[in-house]
Image: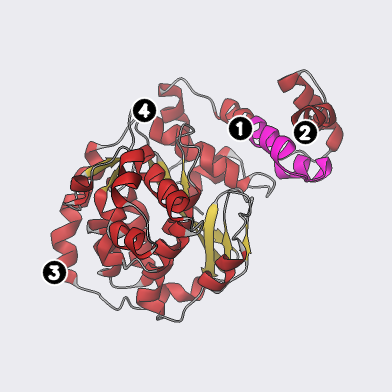
Amino acid sequence: MSLGTTNASALSPKILAAAASGIEELIARHGGDIDAIFGRATISTDQLASPINELNLTQFCALFEEAAKQTGYDNFGLQFGQGFEPQRLGAIGYIAITSPTLAAGLNNLVRYFPAHQDSSILSLEEDRDLLWLTYQILDPRIENRRQDAELSLGMFCNVLRNALGPDWAPLEVHFEHGKPDGGNEHEGRFGAPTLFGQRTNAIAFRREALGQAMGACDPYLFAVIEPFLAERVASRQAPTDLVAALKQEIKLQLGEGSSTLRALARRMGVESAELQRRLRALGVSYNDLMRAVRRDLALRYVRESDMPLTEIALAVGYSELSAFSRAFRAWTGVSPQRYRKGAED
């Protein structure tokens, strides 16, 4: 089941400046040139003066990529996220930690995340007795986003620690980017096995943790903050939200036998008939979305990984390699073997 929400901005996705709170101090600690880094990312330091100022999401990601490059510390985002307290996220952080329980806190974090950041998805996925908090930027124009992914998962871990204690660690951590040169540091920072080249960015924890009380529960502060976030979410909805959310759900569930329209509608909290109605209004079919996701994932796996083709076929929802090969040839005009060889040349 997914409790995910998205918000997509076709022109210029935004993120609240609170997410960059403290970056200047960390740059200085690593001996970096603050003005040069902000200049290359085309962000003014004045934009961080208020936590509710909006930054361009592309520039935000570039800011952390530049900080890692200019300071020579490749795991800059990783360190930044590990030390980032939820309160510094502003309203979205407070709505999580002032909730009564971890379950309520994570549900509120997911529900109101579009008020904090555009063109991204945050969701809670069930996997038997485990839960996965998943995060991903959806805008394909933002290609360099490794630092953002690593700092974001660190921030989310600190939300869980508000309920589970400072020594809590996730069971497993996943990143969509490949393993970097300094990738061995990640397991020490998270205190958990860390896998790279995965479908999305995610942290795993046990379902039983949901009942834990939030250490900063504050009903009065919660009541003050929630209307602000609810208004922002309502004002920022876009027609592409549903398509982006559904494609992400298909992507996460391919190969697990649960990517039917009915199952996806249930995970998104709507009736399948209502989901079909909304898609028709947008001129989109579920089958078209399924084919598009399968194609995009298949091309990525064949081009960028050394996974055996049989495993790729299963991962994108084909039970046999022959069926996958026929589909791949229809998409590209060549076999997956030839396509992979051409990518390597």
Q: Is residue 3 visible?
A: no
Spot occupied by residue 319 in the image (x, y as percentages of width and height): 80, 41
Q: CA distance from mark 3 to mark 1?
A: 44 Å
Q: CA distance from mark 1 to mark 2?
A: 28 Å
- Secondary structure beneath label 2: helix
Disc 4: CA contacts within 10 A as few (<14), some (14-19) or many (>=20): few
Kind of residue at badge 1: Met
Q: CA distance from mark 3 to mark 2?
A: 58 Å
Q: Which disc number belongs to residue 290?
A: 1
User: Compared with residue 48, is residue 29 higher up or lower down, i.e. above or below?
Assistant: below
Which residue corresponds to the image point at 15% horizontal and 62% vertical from the top-left? 223
Kind of residue at badge 3: Tyr
- Secondary structure beneath label 1: helix
Q: Nearer the viewer, mark 3 or mark 4?
A: 4
Do the CB atoms of the residues marked 3 and 1 lie less than 8 Å apart?
Answer: no
Q: CA distance from mark 3 to mark 4?
A: 36 Å
Direction from residue 3 to residue 108 in the image, left or right = left
